[in-house]
Image: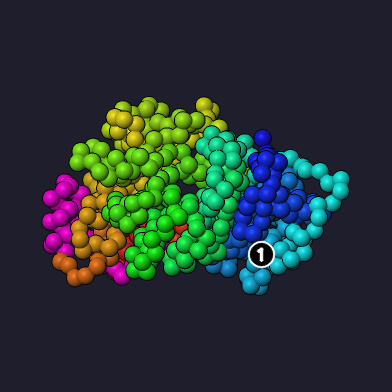
């Protein structure tokens, strides 16, 4: 099933509904068909895009599908050299790029550069030509990974993966007439792709925030009467600051989902206090799984927030339960045997939405299981707790230590605004536990050491402490742990 069929269904059922910003569903369909016809005239095999959020993003996404080509949104925030390397890898392609970014792109064989304004002002305004027919393909989207451990890989998402996710999680035309979703994640993030599909299929209008600023987010959410939104944890914390200081209550907002990184419990607890009328949903997923594979719903949030039972309260830090259409297991080091509840291991997932594929390389096993490289565990009731990337685990004297557990502990200290825990080289133990903290005010290291020791074992208490004004994050809110580790390793080795 092609992703374009979702747009066709929506246009047939409710073509007059708002689709994105000022376009109806029928108008979006017409524009996508016009751009697809133009794309087919180019000497291209994929449609690349580098630019800010806006109406053009879903237009190009569906146009690529109609043209039978993969859509490849590229991270425009990369340094010019890295950006150009990715652009070259898209050949043969047509690259649509924001006008003010075009000068950053070198000439590349097989890459035709077209400015955004030309597509928006001319090509997308044309009527679809008579006799034009849709082409089909297997690959819907190519998303380059962040490349934190090497050259970025092109994750392959096929039409069947994306449509399976939508059909199993969204009810067709279930949104109310006034429902509006605010999308602030960038186009090259999997959440940006899934927002297009779920918005169109549910009948929920999409409003784009071109570039995230917390005050802009709150202002647009209030002005557009936004009912639904998705953010990453670092965005939510900054939005709450804006909401609190600017006294913007956001009365229309009904549901806010978050994902893409670990959500500190103090942040979500603060959000629930400031916005008690909002249903919060934690959505855990990966690019390779076509977005969400587990959800902590609104009722679970409220039950955990109100509970005095530690086992229930801690679920506020979980990602909920796996989606019904998926299978999920926690496996040990051998990658074969499923572990019982309460034991930590690697998260494995299987289901039709799971791609588990990079361009030229399948990474799912013969039985369809995808190893996520995320550590985690399930409680007795099936709630999934994600501990972080296995690459980030600290190995101290043969003991595996999860940075996330220590970070959660540190965040319960009143003086901590943000923190990161990682392993640094150590001659005696192999690695030692180091903490990098951002403090709200002056505090003593001894107080932080005592705070951790009171809750965790001494082997988990950081041995090295670093105080910073801020931590490095990428544009989607993920902590750049490798960058931080390299910097600190260089510092301590001097």
Residue 295 belongs to the span the image colors magenta: no
Q: Position of residue 348 (x, y in %)?
A: 43, 34
User: Can you say whether 77 is above or below 90 in the image?
Assistant: below
Count of numbered marks: 1
Q: Position of residue 243 (x, y in %)?
A: 37, 64
Location of the C terminus by quadrant is bottom left
Residue 77 is left or right of residue 113, and the answer is: left
Q: Position of residue 225 (x, y in %)?
A: 50, 58
- Residue sitting at x 28%, y 41%: 304
- Residue sitting at x 55%, y 51%: 178
- Residue sitting at x 16%, y 48%: 455
User: Can you say whether 102 is above or below 27 in the image?
Assistant: below
Residue 79 appears in the figure: yes
Residue 96: quarter of image: bottom right
Q: Nearer the viewer, residue 449 or 256?
A: 256
Residue 244 is left or right of residue 439, and the answer is: right
Q: Position of residue 147 (x, y in %)?
A: 50, 55
Q: Nearer the viewer, residue 365 or 443?
A: 443
Q: Which residue is mark 1?
A: 97
Residue 165: quarter of image: top right
Which residues are drawn in magenta?
445-473
- Residue sitting at x 32%, y 57%: 274
């Amino acid at each position: 099933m092609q992703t374009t069929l979702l747009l066709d269904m929506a246009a047939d059922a409710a073509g007059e509904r708002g689709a994105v910003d000022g376009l109806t569903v029928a108008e979006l369909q017409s524009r996508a068909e016009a751009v697809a016809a133009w794309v087919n005239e180019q000497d291209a095999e994929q449609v690349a895009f580098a630019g800010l959020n806006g109406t053009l993003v879903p237009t190009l996404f569906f146009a690529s599908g109609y043209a039978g080509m993969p859509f490849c949104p590229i991270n425009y925030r990369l340094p010019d050299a890295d950006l150009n390397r990715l652009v070259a890898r898209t050949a043969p392609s047509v690259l649509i790029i924001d006008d003010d970014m075009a000068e950053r792109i070198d000439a590349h064989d097989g890459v035709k550069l077209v400015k955004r304004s030309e597509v928006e002002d001319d090509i997308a305004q044309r009527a679809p030509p008579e006799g034009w027919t849709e082409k089909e393909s297997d690959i819907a989207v190519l998303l380059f990974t962040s490349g934190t451990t090497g050259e970025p890989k092109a994750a392959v998402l096929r039409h069947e993966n994306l449509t399976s996710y939508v059909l199993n999680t969204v009810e067709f035309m279930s949104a109310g007439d006034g429902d509006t979703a605010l999308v602030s994640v960038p186009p090259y993030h999997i959440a940006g792709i899934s927002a297009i599909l779920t918005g169109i299929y549910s009948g929920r209008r999409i409003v784009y925030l071109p570039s995230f600023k917390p005050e802009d987010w709150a202002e647009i959410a209030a002005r557009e009467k936004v009912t639904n939104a998705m953010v990453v944890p670092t965005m939510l914390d900054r939005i709450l600051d804006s909401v609190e200081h600017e006294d913007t209550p956001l009365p229309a907002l009904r549901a806010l989902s978050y994902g893409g990184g670990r959500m500190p419990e103090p942040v979500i607890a603060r959000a629930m206090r400031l916005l008690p009328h909002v249903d919060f949903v934690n959505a855990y997923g990966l690019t390779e799984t076509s977005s969400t594979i587990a959800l902590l719903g609104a009722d679970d949030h409220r039950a955990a927030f109100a509970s005095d039972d530690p086992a229930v309260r801690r679920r506020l830090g979980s990602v909920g339960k796996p989606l019904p259409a998926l299978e999920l297991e926690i496996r040990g080091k051998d990658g074969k045997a499923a572990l019982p509840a309460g034991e930590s291991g690697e998260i494995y997932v299987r289901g039709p939405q799971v791609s588990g594929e990079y361009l030229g390389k399948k990474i799912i096993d013969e039985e369809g299981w995808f190893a996520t490289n995320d550590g985690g565990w399930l409680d007795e009731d099936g709630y999934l707790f994600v501990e972080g990337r296995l690459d980030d685990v600290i190995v101290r004297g043969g003991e595996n230590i999860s940075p996330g557990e220590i970070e959660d502990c540190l965040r319960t200290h009143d003086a901590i605004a943000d923190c990161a825990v990682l392993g640094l080289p150590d001659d005696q133990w192999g690695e030692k536990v180091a903490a990098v903290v951002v403090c709200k005010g002056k505090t003593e290291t001894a107080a932080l050491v005592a705070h951790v020791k009171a809750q965790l074992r001494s082997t988990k208490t950081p041995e090295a402490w670093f105080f910073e004004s801020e931590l490095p994050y990428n544009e989607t809110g993920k902590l750049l742990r490798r960058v931080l580790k390299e910097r600190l390793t260089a510092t301590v080795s001097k």
